[in-house]
Amino acid sequence: MNAPVQTPSIAFVASPADAAQNALIDLRRNYPSVAPEKADVIVALGGDGFMLETLHRYIGVGAAIFGMHRGTVGFLMNHFDRDGLMARITRANRVELTPLLMRVETMDGQQMSAHAINEVSLLRETRQTAHLRITIDGVVRIDELMCDGVIVATPAGSTAYNLSAHGPVVPLSAEVLCLTPISAFRPRRWRGAILPRDALVRFEVCDPDKRPVSAVADFTEMRDVRWVEVEEDTGVSFTLLFDPEHDLDERVLKEQFVT
């Protein structure tokens, strides 16, 4: 006889938005749940911002995340439906994401780090442009980039801030990172680069006293940085669950043809 299929334990979390909180109450009434730290699957109710928060908050738990859209932007979310949730989770497709690791040294000598699922961005803090030196795997590729900022994006994040900054959309299966300038002034026609996923990207702030720069990993911001290093953290991964009809690879691909 075949062994019975074990029902995964589920936790529910929700953003503060009314729609998400109402859905949370409804689902808890209809399905047994456990604490997120004890769950096989965490059901996240909200938008893409809350999905990123959930991934970061439970980075060491090991649970898969099944998002349902009860927020503003829902690119990373499945549609919301109270009924048939267990069946949807059972038949869901699994997508594995690997984050970026950002390491920073600030002007006062502090060294800090943070993970980014979408992107790491460096941004000017004042009215003056940032001056940045870009080194890839120990080789200086741009001695001075004058710009509002620059982005290193994962394939999953290529459709977010990276796309708004006119960076390329790349498939989830592409083993690359996107390096995209924000309003580059010099070199005037530099539009960025596609890098191997194992590249080590280093940014040095050329004039940090006069032209201060902040560094942001998703929603973790560090101000007045001296240098920033970004690389993929292969020791960490996230599992997202999607309805078969909500093919994330297909959605990313379609973004290249949206007019």
Image (cartoon, helix red, strand yellow):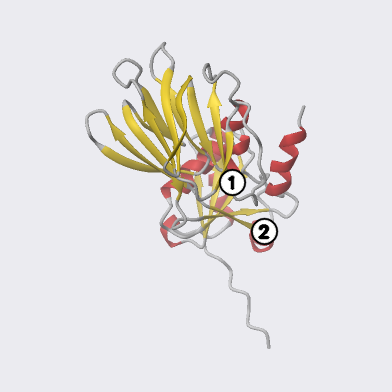
Which residue is located at x 29 percent, y 35 percent?
A: 105
* SS at mark 2 in the image: loop
> Which residue matches tag 1?
176
Residue 159 in the image: above or below residue 147: below
Q: Which quadrant of the figure contains the C terminus?
A: top right
Q: Nearer the viewer, residue 235 or 35?
A: 235
* SS at mark 1 in the image: strand
The image quadrant of residue 64 is bottom right
Q: Position of residue 90 (x, y in %)?
A: 65, 63
The image quadrant of residue 114 is top left
Which residue is located at x 37 percent, y 24 percent?
A: 213
Residue 208 in the image: above or below residue 24: above
Q: Position of residue 59 (x, y in %)?
A: 43, 52
Residue 17 in the image: above or below residue 93: above
Tag 2: amino acid: Ala
Q: Nearer the viewer, residue 225 or 53?
A: 225
> Which residue matches tag 2?
92
Tag 1: amino acid: Val
Which residue is located at x 48 percent, y 19 percent?
A: 148
Q: Nearer the viewer, residue 179 or 112?
A: 179
Q: Which quadrant of the figure contains the N terminus?
A: bottom right
The tag on residue 113 is none
Residue 47 appears in the picture as rendered:
no
